[in-house]
Amino acid sequence: MDTAARQGDTVARTYRQIPTEILRGISVVATDIDGTLTGPDGVIRSAAARAVHDIEAHGIPVCLLSGRTIDTVEDVARRLQTTGFLVGEDGGVAKRRVGATLTDLGYSRRPALNALAILRATLGDRIQETEDNQCRLVDVAIRNEGIRVRQIRRLLDGVSVLDSGFMIHLVDVRVSKAATLLRLLSGNGSPTATPPQAVLVFGDSPTDLSLFHEFPHSVLVSNPVQDEAEARRLRKAAAYSTESSYGEGFAEVVRFLIEARRSP
């Protein structure tokens, strides 16, 4: 991976330090939804919605990547009028655009369902599925109240256990937001494929770590309710960080990106 943006740093720097030449080379923006475009209430912040509209107006498609179901991601894309890829279930399912059919990623829900059975046998009623779990195709989502992620990870093998801060996701270990986004960007080997260096990625939680690891130009959106240990890990993985929190943090970076592309 190109590590020029990091320059040996171990902690993310402010977005104001992103070089102008990097910003001018960005052709795709890819962002998480919850905690990144929204606040803790799950509602898209108005500043983030305006920022998405503005960057799309400059010809840069916005891709949405989330732990939500693909139908919910598509609903958000319609409201925000994005033109980029749609990725749900933390990389388990995807569409190339609003209204498209599902892309065949080859993933199965079986590993996640097996993991759920183990947790139920071990922890009983402490394991509560989320309301949308029956609508999911690849991952399993359970409530995170009173459950420690470390405890779950000790019980399971062959699945990733991801805590978004809103719920806990169980998914085939091969699945990640970054892996799916890279596949979509490659265009099956198309000569017009978008390289990772042309993508600016945004996230706020451990579910976004794969993006920070695989894409050199990454922005950690401040999330004040993030567990401090996880926050330190995220700051070390991301290249840059916002000053504001939630959707306002995303918006300030987009404004900086647009201004850099306007400057002579």
Image (cartoon, helix red, strand yellow):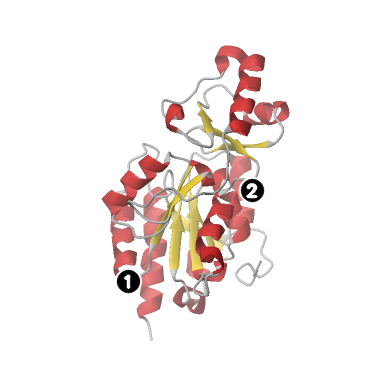
Count of numbered circles in the view: 2
Determine which residue is flagged by label 1: 58
Determine which residue is flagged by label 2: 233
Nearer-N-terminus badge (1/2): 1
Q: Is residue 90 left or right of residue 70?
A: right
Where disc 1 sits, the SS reads loop
Q: CA distance from mark 1 to mark 2?
A: 33 Å
Q: Residue at x 39, y 77 (%)?
A: 261
Q: Residue at x 66, y 66 (%)?
A: 1
Give, as a three-letter code, the residue at label 1.
His
Q: Are marks 1 and 2 in contact (CB under 8 Å)?
A: no
**In the image as oriented, which residue stretches furthest toward the bottom?**
264
Q: Nearer the viewer, residue 18 or 34?
A: 34
Q: Nearer the viewer, residue 132 or 94?
A: 94
Rendered-image quadrant of the C terminus: bottom left
Give, as a three-letter code, the residue at label 2.
Arg
- Can you give x and y, in whole percent of width and height, for residue 164 in the image? 52, 39
Where disc 2 sits, the SS reads helix
